[in-house]
Amino acid sequence: MDTTLSIDDAEFWHRPLGERMARFAQLREEGPFTPGEVENPLTGERDRFLAVTRMAEVMEISRRPKDFCSGRGSTSIQDMPAEAAEFFGSFIAMDDPRHARQRGIVARSFTPRQLSGVLDSVETICDEVIDGMCEQGEVDLVEAVSQPFPLLIICDMMGIPRSEFGTVLAATNVILGAGDPEVLAGRDIASALFGAGAELIGLMNELVEFRRSNPTDDLTSALVHNEVGEDTLAPHEIGPFFILLAVAGNDTTRNGISIGMQLLAENPDQRRVWQDDPAAVTPTAVEEVVRAASPVTFMRRTVTRDLTLSGQELSEGERLVLFYGAANRDPRVFDDPERFDVLRDPNPHVGFGGPGPHFCLGAHLARRELAVMFQRLLTRLPDLEVVGAPVPLEALGIPLVGGIKHLPVRFTPTAPLAA
């Protein structure tokens, strides 16, 4: 295991999860902030940043948006034009009052009561996805399960017809896997990214226009029709929100399933605990999957004024990169943090982001999706086993999402429920 690789080296992010976390453990004990730099493709220069690896600092920075803002960059370590950041990040790349306004509009449709129909459909779509692969006996879990499952839920929630699912899947794969040669298929990164974004926005603009005169009970209708006195998203705001939902709204579930199955393969004792009593163990097991996997690698914040934090003098404009996986294994917070423990309780992880205005709006839905899928896999395909090494996304530099693009599994074929 090479524990000298820098975290800003692309090769570092192609290493197994355990190796990456071992390196972060070293850095975490050296201090709460670690200097790094990444190449900015727009300028050709190196943008410097400070990696934040301890839980205390991640929490403190998250809860102080006036001192550590998102509007200068949140999903990109490099400085990007504001319009580009908002094109792909919607309101997670904004600060108040614009952030509060847009998030508040969307949040009306993300309460447990408003999501009740979506939450109920999770089981139906989960069974549909497993039915589509359960007779095969051997599949790529990512392609067969992890990839389509959360995106089908999002498309149904937005009211996007199944005939457009392939378009949405291809575009989100480009945005999530930008830099991976397999995903780019010969295209340059910039044109592939903006082409995928434009495709999703074009699709949403057509749907929005249709829903204005043909409303249903989907989320798109809710976003373009309001109650008396309620604000709505402007037409140009809905497309970027859909990109956010289609990308950020599925990456936790998608990679939580893939990395979670790999973690169960590496920890068969924990798999037995979960499989012996799925209903009782699932609540804590899901939280442990999110903690250990930490699918969202980072979010960036920018210092808005000269200040001192944990003894570190920070200057206005400095980039701080919150590494959630490192914080989620901080021994100051978690007992035996490198152990995967499906019964871990309490489990105050930041897998859905830290406290404050940017905490994941879809955490409730993601938890539901992970709970249902793992229970179904453990009961419907009880002998499912990983039969090959996970293949990571080959991102350029530090990936926003630490994804797995292939994970071969094998199981005893079984009949679909819909047969």
Image (cartoon, rainbow, N blue to C red):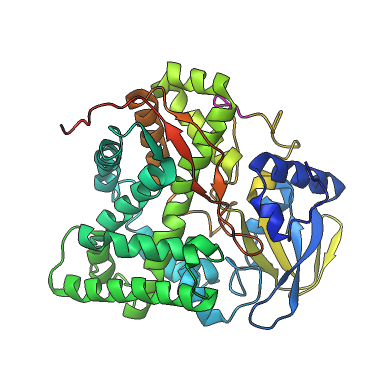
Residue 267 in picture, x, y percent from top left: 59, 25
Residue 417 in picture, x, y percent from top left: 20, 30
- Quadrant assignment, res 123: top left
Quadrant assignment for the C terminus: top left
Q: Which residue ends up furthest to the left in the rendered image?
A: 214
Q: Does residue 327 appear to the left or right of 391 in the view shown?
A: right
**Identity of the residue drawn at 58% across and 52% down:** 402
- From this view, report whether residue 387 is shown above or below residue 63: above
**Identity of the residue drawn at 46% across and 40% down:** 257
Residue 42 in picture, x, y percent from top left: 63, 82
Give the magenta part as a residue range. Answer: 340-344
**Identity of the residue drawn at 25% across and 40% down:** 128
Q: Does residue 253 appear to the left or right of 79 in the view shown?
A: left
Residue 228 in picture, x, y percent from top left: 23, 70
- Answer yes or no: is residue 245 visible: no
SS majority, magenta: loop
- Quadrant assignment, res 400: bottom right
- Quadrant assignment, res 205: bottom left
Residue 404 lies in magenta, yes or no? Answer: no
Depth check, front residue: 404 or 412: 412
**Identity of the residue drawn at 39% across and 66% down:** 171
Q: Does residue 215 appear to the left or right of 322 in the view shown?
A: left
Q: Which residue ends up furthest to the top in the rendered image?
A: 276
Quadrant assignment for the N terminus: top right
